[in-house]
Image (spheres, rainbow, N blue to C red):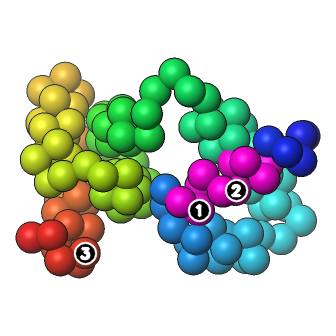
């Protein structure tokens, strides 16, 4: 594992999903879970999110659609906040979830809309 890539990923992860969340995740990781935290921080956030090919806004839109399609509502909540942090508006979030609902199915779309709605309400955007 590259320490530079981990540090880059740590900075991006903290900016996108929130420093407090990241600090809690790392602080709460025991020896078993730390391996996963290092993997996610280094490769997901450092290597992929750190690439120049897409903006963070674009990556957030893609993540919302994929997480909706996969039915990963807890991650979708986290990445809805990340999408807000990356400058996406409610309309863009809604459109990404509508797109996912059409291609991934209405039940997945409904779960995604409920999860995103919860985050948008709690953040004062609705």
Q: Which residues are magenta?
A: 6-15
Check the image and report above or below for 104 versus 38: above
Q: Nearer the viewer, residue 30 or 125?
A: 125
Check the image and report above or below for 7 versus 106: below
Check the image and report above or below for 26 versus 69: below
User: Which residue corresponds to the image point at 17% horizontal and 77% vertical from the top-left?
Assistant: 124
Find residue 99 and report its horizontal and vertical position in percent. 16, 29
* Mark 1–mark 3 CB contact (< 8 Å): no
Find residue 118 and report its horizontal and vertical position in percent. 21, 69
Circle 3 residues within 10 Å: few <14, some 14–19, many ≥20? few
Quarter assignment of residue 5: top right
Disc 2 secondary structure class: helix
Picture quarter with the C terminus: bottom left
Q: Earlier in the sequence, mark 2 or mark 3?
A: 2
Quarter assignment of residue 84: bottom left
Q: Which mark is residue 10?
A: 2
Dominant secondary structure, magenta: helix
How many numbered marks have been drawn onto this rendered protein structure?
Answer: 3
User: Which residue corresponds to the image point at 17% horizontal and 63% vertical from the top-left?
Assistant: 117
Q: Nearer the viewer, residue 69 or 37?
A: 37
Residue named by callout 1: 14
* Mark 2–mark 3 CB contact (< 8 Å): no
Q: Which mark is residue 113?
A: none
Marks 2 and 3 sit apart, C-alpha to C-alpha, by 24 Å
User: Which residue corresponds to the image point at 63% horizontal and 44% vertical from the top-left?
Assistant: 45
Residue named by callout 3: 123
Q: As drawn, is 25 to the left or to the right of 61?
A: right
């Amino acid at each position: 594992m590259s320490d530079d890539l981990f540090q880059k990923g740590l900075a991006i992860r903290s900016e996108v999903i929130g420093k407090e969340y990241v600090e809690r995740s790392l602080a709460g990781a025991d020896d078993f879970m730390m391996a996963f935290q290092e993997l996610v921080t280094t490769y997901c956030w450092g290597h992929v999110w750190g690439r120049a090919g897409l903006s963070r806004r674009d990556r957030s839109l893609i993540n919302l659609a994929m997480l909706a399609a996969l039915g990963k509502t807890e991650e979708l909540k986290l990445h809805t906040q990340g999408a807000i942090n990356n400058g996406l508006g409610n309309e863009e979030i809604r459109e990404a979830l509508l797109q996912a609902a059409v291609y991934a199915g209405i039940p997945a779309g409904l779960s995604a809309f409920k999860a995103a709605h919860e985050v948008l309400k709690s953040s004062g955007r609705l």
